[in-house]
C-alpha cells in the first residue's frame, strides 16, 4: 500500500519523537513516560470521557491504558502505525470494555420480582438502538484496520479529521480517503444486514 507506515520520522522541533520516548521508556526512563503522558493524557481522557460519559470511569480507563504502556511498552509496533493511533485504539478498547462491564453489573443488581410490568416508555426504542449498535459493531470489524481506526476516532471519539490526522500521523488527505472508503463499505455491509433481516432488496439490486 502506498500509505503504509514507514520508520518513525525525526522530530522537526528538536523534541524526541514518540518512538524515541517509547524506546527510552522500555529502558526504564520515567521521564519519557511523563513526556508521553503530557502529550497524550488530555486527548486520551477526552476520548474515554466521550465513550464512558462518567468522568471517574474515564479517568480509570486512562490510568489503565497508561499503566499498560508503562508495563509493556514493547507492545507498540511502529511498523503498524503511529504511537498516537496505537494509544487511542488502546484507550478506546478499554473504554468500551469498561462501559460493558458497568452495564453488566447494573443488570445484575436490578432486583427480580414476580410482577410483570408493562414496558417503560422508550424501551422499544432502546432495544432497537441496542440491535442497531450490535450490527454497527459487527460491520466495523469487517473494515481494514486503518479504516477502522479513523472511523473509531472520528465517529466514536468525536475528533475532527484534522485532529485524526495529527493523532495518527498520516496526511489529512489520507484520513479523508480512508473515511470515505470506510463509510461506503459500511453502507454496503449494513444495507446487506438489514436486507437479510427484512427480506428486502437493497437499492443496488432493484
Image: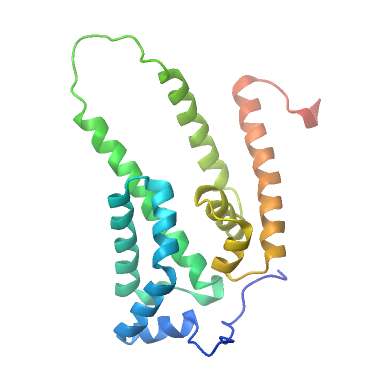
> Residue 40 vs residue 139: left or right?
left
Instruction: Tell whether 96 sits left or right of 143.
Output: left
Give the number of callouts.
Answer: 0
Q: What is the image's colouring?
A: rainbow
x, y percent for residue 37: 37, 72
Residue sitting farthest toward the right: 206
Q: Quadrant of the C terminus?
A: top right
Viewer-proximal residue among 31 and 132: 31
Q: Foreground: 1 or 54? A: 54
Which residue is outermost to the bottom?
A: 14
Residue 202 x %, y %? 73, 28
Residue 38 in which image quadrant: bottom left
**The image quarter in which residue 60 lies:** bottom left
Residue at the spot 43% in from the left edge and 48% down from the top edge: 50
Please tell me in which quadrant of the rendered image residue 91 appears: bottom left
From the top left corner, tell me how far across and down residue 59 is, in percent.
Answer: 30, 57
Q: Is residue 182 above or below residue 174?
A: above
Give the x, y percent position of residue 156. 51, 48
Relative to 93, 164 lies left or right? right
Residue 194 lies, with reference to residue 121, above or below; the image says: below
Residue 146 sits above or below residue 206 on the image: below
Quarter that holds the N terminus? bottom right
Q: Residue at x 55, y 55 (%)?
A: 159
Residue shown at 51% from the left, 65% from the top: 85
Residue at horizontal 40 percent and vertical 76 percent from the top: 36
Amino acid at each position: 500500500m502506498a500509505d503504509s507506515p514507514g520508520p518513525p520520522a525525526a522530530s522537526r522541533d528538536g523534541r524526541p519523537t514518540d518512538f524515541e520516548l517509547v524506546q527510552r521508556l522500555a529502558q526504564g526512563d520515567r521521564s519519557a513516560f511523563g513526556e508521553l503522558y503530557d502529550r497524550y493524557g488530555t486527548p486520551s481522557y477526552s476520548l474515554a470521557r466521550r465513550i464512558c460519559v462518567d468522568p471517574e470511569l474515564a479517568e480509570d480507563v486512562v490510568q489503565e491504558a497508561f499503566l499498560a504502556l508503562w508495563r509493556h511498552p514493547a507492545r507498540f509496533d511502529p511498523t503498524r502505525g503511529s504511537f498516537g493511533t496505537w494509544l487511542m485504539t488502546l484507550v478506546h478498547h478499554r473504554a468500551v470494555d469498561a462501559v460493558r462491564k458497568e452495564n453488566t453489573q447494573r443488570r445484575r443488581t436490578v432486583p427480580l420480582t414476580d410482577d410483570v410490568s408493562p414496558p417503560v416508555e422508550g424501551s422499544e426504542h432502546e432495544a432497537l438502538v441496542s440491535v442497531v449498535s450490535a450490527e454497527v459493531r459487527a460491520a466495523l470489524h469487517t473494515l481494514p484496520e486503518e479504516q477502522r481506526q479513523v472511523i473509531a476516532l472520528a465517529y466514536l471519539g468525536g475528533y475532527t479529521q484534522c485532529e485524526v490526522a495529527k493523532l495518527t500521523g498520516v496526511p489529512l488527505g489520507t484520513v479523508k480517503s480512508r473515511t470515505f472508503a470506510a463509510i461506503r463499505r459500511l453502507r454496503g455491509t449494513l444495507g446487506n444486514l438489514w436486507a437479510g433481516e427484512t427480506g428486502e432488496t437493497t437499492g443496488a439490486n432493484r
